[in-house]
């Protein structure tokens, strides 16, 4: 038998699954991504440790599930858990594939309506793309974008989207800067809300 390499043991996006069937046809099924249930109820606050002179601080390494943090990174701060456009989420370390960074959730009615995951751009763009295809299957749309850095270096960046039952996933290997990429996961309801907001914003011109 072969010996497992460090690369084999790195966290990866787990195969796609719908955690629970909706009670009604028009309800959104729960979709697991990086250990976070998109379409499901918001999880717990991250574990807190009380330190002398520092007060309550987060101790995320002791978390047993994905958890949320207050915007100023200090527990006890007033945080809207009912409707929040950008709530910091901390996945478990074994649910964070190489190249992924900060994770923020859009919370609507106490449920996770969407996720925004930053990535490290060209560094792991192709590897992340391949992992997403393993998890989600063949993309609904797929292409590549040529990007030129500020010093003239040229990069090819993958770009793809997956239209899945009740949810849409989009990946842009490079956005704005060559060391920045993004993954977005949105329920269909959240996608429709964003489209409505853009149309409303356009009317302001």
Image (cartoon, helix red, strand yellow):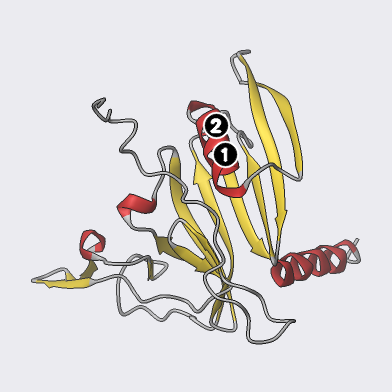
Seen in the image, is 99 located left or right of residue 143?
Answer: left
Q: Give the residue at mark 1.
A: 181
Circles 1, 2 touching at the beta carbon (< 8 Å): yes
Q: How many marks?
A: 2
Residue 61 screen position, x and y as percent: 22, 59
Q: Earlier in the sequence, mark 1 or mark 2?
A: 2
Gap between marks 1 and 2 measured at Cα: 8 Å
Q: Quadrant of residue 166?
A: bottom right
The image's mark for residue 16 is: none
Q: Give the residue at mark 2.
A: 125
Please tell me whether mark 1 sits on a helix, a strand or a loop.
strand
Seen in the image, is 91 located left or right of residue 110?
Answer: left
Residue 118 screen position, x and y as percent: 51, 46
Say above or below: 4 vs 194.
Answer: above
Residue 170 screen position, x and y as percent: 66, 48
Please tell me whether mark 2 sits on a helix, a strand or a loop.
helix
Q: Measuring 65% from the left and 62% from the top, which residue is drawn there?
A: 186
Q: Which quadrant would the N terminus be assigned to in this image?
A: top left
Q: Report crowding for label 1: few under 14, some 14 to 19, many 20 or more residues within 10 A (C-alpha).
A: many
Q: Nearer the viewer, mark 1 or mark 2?
A: 2
Seen in the image, is 89 located left or right of residue 131?
Answer: left
Q: Measuring 68% from the left and 81% from the top, which residue is drawn there?
A: 27
């Amino acid at each position: 038998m072969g010996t497992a390499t460090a690369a084999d043991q790195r966290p990866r996006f787990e195969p796609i699954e719908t955690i629970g069937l909706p009670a009604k046809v028009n309800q959104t099924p729960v979709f697991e991504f990086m250990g976070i249930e998109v379409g499901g109820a918001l999880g717990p606050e991250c574990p807190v440790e009380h330190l002398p002179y520092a007060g309550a601080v987060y101790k995320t390494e002791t978390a047993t599930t994905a958890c949320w943090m207050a915007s100023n990174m200090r527990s006890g701060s007033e945080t809207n858990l009912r409707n929040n456009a950008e709530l910091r989420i901390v996945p478990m370390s074994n649910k964070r594939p190489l190249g992924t960074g900060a994770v923020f959730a859009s919370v609507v009615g106490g449920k996770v309506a969407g996720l925004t995951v930053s990535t490290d751009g060209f560094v792991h763009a192709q590897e992340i793309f391949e992992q997403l295809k393993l998890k989600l299957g063949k993309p609904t749309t797929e292409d590549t974008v040529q990007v030129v850095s500020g010093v003239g270096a040229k990069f090819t960046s993958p770009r793809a989207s997956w239209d899945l039952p009740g949810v849409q996933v989009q990946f842009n290997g490079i956005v704005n800067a060559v060391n920045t990429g993004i993954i977005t996961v949105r329920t269909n309801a959240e996608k429709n809300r964003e489209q409505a907001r853009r149309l409303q914003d356009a009317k302001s011109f």
